[in-house]
Every structure is written in C-alpha cells, then in structure tokens.
Image (cartoon, rainbow, N blue to C red):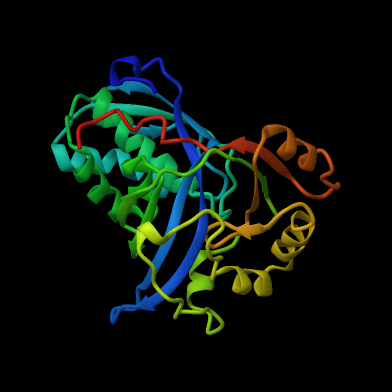
Amino acid sequence: MSEATDWSWASDWPAPAKLNLFLHVVGRRADGYHLLQTLFRFVDHGDLLRFAPRGGGEVVLATPLPGVAPETDLTVRAARLLQAETGCRDGVTITLEKRLPMGGGLGGGSSDAATVLLALNHLWGLGLPRQRLQALGLTLGADVPIFVYGRNAFAEGVGEAFTPVDVPAAWYVVLEPPVSVPTVDIFRSPRLRRDSPAISARQWRPGFGGNDLQPVAVALHPAVGEALGWLSAFGEARMTGSGACVFAEFATRQQAEAVLAQLPGGLRGWVAPGLPAHPLVGLCAP
C-alpha cells in the first residue's frame, strides 16, 4: 500500500467503486431518514482524478460531465468545501476520467468527492484528520464518508457509523444495466421493506442477507431484473446500493472472466478483484 509521500501533483488518484455485499433497511427515524445496515467492499475498478495547481483560488473542472453543471459537481463542491473549512487560498484544476456509471449504485460520485478531499488535503498541506474529512464528506452525500474512512466495513445508522471488517479475497463480475436509478425513487416507494432484523457487525458472514432495495428497483426498472436473471445462472447475483448495477462473487479471476466471456450483446460488464482497503487509506492521520 502506498505511503503518503508517494502521492504528488503528478499522480493519478484513484476513486474506486464500492459494492454493498448486503443492504438492509432496519427502520426509519422520525425525520424520515432510513436506518440501514450494510457491508461496504471496495473493488479494484473506478474513476481516476488528476490535479494541477491553479492561482487565484479558482476551482475548475476541466472535464465536466454531460448534464451536470460544474458548480454542482461533487468534485468541485468538495474542493470548495475544503477551501471554506480551512481558509485555503490555493486553487486547482481537476481532471476526471469517468469510468463508473452515474446512478449505478457503485458510489462513483461519492468516491470522486472523497478522493478530492483526501488528495487536496494532502496536496495543499492542510493536515485535516480523517474524522474531520469524513464529517465534511457527509455534508456532500451519505456515501462519501466510507470512501474517506477507507476500510471495508460494516456500516449502520444512515450509513455513517463504521466497524472495520476483514472481507475474504474474491473476484466480482459486475454488470451495468443501461438505466440510471434515482436513489430517492427507491426510498420513497411504499413497496420498500423497512423492518429487516438488525444484526451486529460480528454476526456478519459472507453470503449473509440480501438487498432490500432490489425488489423496488427491479419493479421500476426491468433492465435491472434482466441483468440479475442472466447473472444468477452463474452464482448468487445481487444489486449494489440502490442500483442499477448488479454483481456476483467468484473465488478466482479465471471463474469470473469465464462468466464475463459469455455476456450477451446489449449487456455491459467488467471483472475486478476486491480490495483489502482503499488505495488512499494511509494518506492522513485518524
């Protein structure tokens, strides 16, 4: 794992995807937020970011996403949040190489934002501890803190309370159905189960549970169900997050690639190993 001294302005900064190995809704708070339990697992596939110093305190995204105004992009918001929090007057040009689909449940935008927080905290010499960066990340989105936390973890609450978990080595086939699933549509659905029994982190075992959001996503987006149906012929297939992406776990790279090789036309997918931790986990103090 790389030490902080290895990371510089010349680096390509990773923003890996996450999978939810299970995702249960165990209740709902009085303010409407859903209480969740999940197991976050990082995989070795994701976006890449590059940073270049810029004068005048400007934050510029050199690669804006179609349909997303630069000022609302999570990468720009994360950089400006760091400036506001610390009084930093440095600027930056951000280049984003987007590989993860939007609305896929892989945490792409959240992972990008977390990498911006971690990278610029380091490059600008701000010295904020990880817990502070996690708190800042939570103001940007519910999934940002896990990427700052940087360890495969059992998560609960609204998804921000973590217990580290050693997840066995595995390879994953991940399919990207050609739809974008808005998270808000899933959580507002009356079909959503909200009473799964809670467990403790030490009770989790590989293969446990399912995804309570999956039946709602399948009902709203048949393409998710079609991808699940195809992948289920080779192993236990699950949706990650609120969708649309689905995955199955395999013991070896050869097994995973043999499945992907049979992917029919019209379906897009990839193979990646699970990561023992986020590549930037050693970048700042706790």
Q: Is residue 130 above or below residue 233?
A: above
Residue displayed at 30% across by 28% down: 282
Q: Could you say where residue 57 lies in the image, as x and y percent from the top left?
A: 24, 30
Of residue 35 and residue 199, the one placed in the foreground of this image is: 199
Q: Is residue 73 left or right of residue 285?
A: right
Seen from this angle, which residue lies furthest left? 87
Of residue 91 and residue 169, the one placed in the foreground of this image is: 169
Residue displayed at 48% across by 73% down: 187
Residue 181's image quarter? Answer: bottom right
Q: Could you say where residue 276 lies in the image, as x and y percent from the top left?
A: 45, 35
Q: Is residue 218 above or below residue 264?
A: below
Residue displayed at 60% across by 74% down: 216
Q: In this view, does 195 lie above or below 276?
A: below
Q: Could you say where residue 188 lies in the image, as x and y percent from the top left?
A: 48, 78
Q: In which quarter of the image is the N terminus?
A: top left
Total count of labels: 0
Q: In which quarter of the image is the C terminus?
A: top left
Q: Is residue 19 left or right of residue 140?
A: right
Q: Is residue 191 left or right of residue 85?
A: right
Residue displayed at 33% across by 45% down: 77
Q: Could you say where residue 157 lies in the image, as x and y percent from the top left?
A: 32, 65
Residue 121's image quarter? Answer: top left
Seen from this angle, which residue lies furthest bottom? 190
Q: In this view, does 24 lie above or below 56?
A: below
